[in-house]
Image (spheres, rainbow, N blue to C red):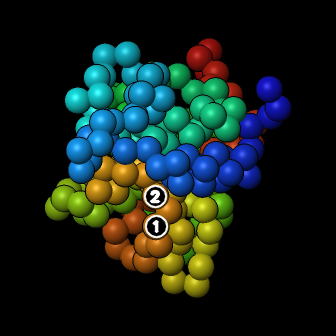
């Protein structure tokens, strides 16, 4: 496989968002099998309505990034949970972690962590930046109304952090 790049991640995320993947919605059966396959203890029913971080993990894997579902840096849970992405990024010095909107200019292929998008809590949503606009970003996200989509979000206080995985990243278990 070619070296994983953020450019490839954008392509994969766009394509995946537009399939669209969905949980059990409007009488439709779930098509989340590929999204939850890396998480062997999850069933389609358990993942229903809780799969935004698993969508990001799926896209990263499809783009060629080699990351285990539960790197040792993840204390709280595996990468099917938003908080684990933050734990992972903060603890691996090869990954850039930028808190909030501290003047960081997101680029396509960056991962965006949100607070208080769907619930009044931290780490409640995650997506992949597709495009940076003047006061907003376009992001590919899973689990927006239990569907994947591309959505425009303002650059505001709901953005908890940006994570930039370097091109060619491969998890090193011996660090």
- Taking the view exactly as shown, the residue that stands out farthest to the left is 120
Q: Is residue 136 above or below residue 96?
A: below
| Residue designated by label 2 | 149
Q: Quadrant of the N terminus?
A: top right
How many neighbours does mark 2 have within 10 angstroms: few (below 14), some (14-19), or many (20 or more)? many
| Residue 155, image quadrant | bottom left
Front position in the image: 101 or 38: 38
Front position in the image: 103 or 37: 37
How many neighbours does mark 1 have within 10 angstroms: few (below 14), some (14-19), or many (20 or more)? some
| Residue designated by label 1 | 151
Asked which secondary structure carries label 1, the reply is strand
Whether the residues at callouts 2 and 1 have beta carbons within 8 Å, the answer is: yes
Q: Residue at x 46, y 67 (%)?
A: 151
Q: Residue at x 35, y 73 (%)?
A: 157
Image check: 120 left or right of 24?
A: left
| Residue 100, image quadrant | bottom left
Q: Residue at x 57, y 27 (%)?
A: 67
Residue 104 lies, in percent from the top left, at 58, 69
């Amino acid at each position: 496989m070619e070296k994983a790049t953020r450019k490839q991640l954008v392509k994969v995320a766009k394509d995946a968002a537009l399939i669209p993947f969905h949980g059990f919605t409007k009488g439709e059966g779930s098509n989340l099998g590929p999204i939850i396959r890396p998480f062997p203890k999850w069933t389609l029913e358990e993942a229903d309505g809780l799969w935004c971080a698993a969508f990001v993990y799926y896209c990263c894997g499809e783009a060629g990034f080699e990351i285990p579902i539960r790197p040792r840096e993840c204390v709280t849970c595996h990468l099917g949970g938003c908080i684990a992405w933050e734990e992972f990024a903060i603890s691996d010095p090869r990954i850039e972690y930028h808190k909030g909107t501290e003047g960081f200019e997101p680029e396509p292929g960056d991962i965006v962590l949100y607070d208080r998008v769907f619930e009044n809590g931290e780490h409640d949503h995650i997506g992949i930046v597709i495009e940076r606009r003047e006061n907003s970003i376009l992001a590919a996200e899973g689990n927006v109304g239990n569907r994947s989509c591309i959505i425009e979000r303002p650059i505001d206080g709901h953005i908890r952090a940006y994570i930039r995985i370097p091109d060619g990243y491969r998890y090193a278990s011996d660090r």
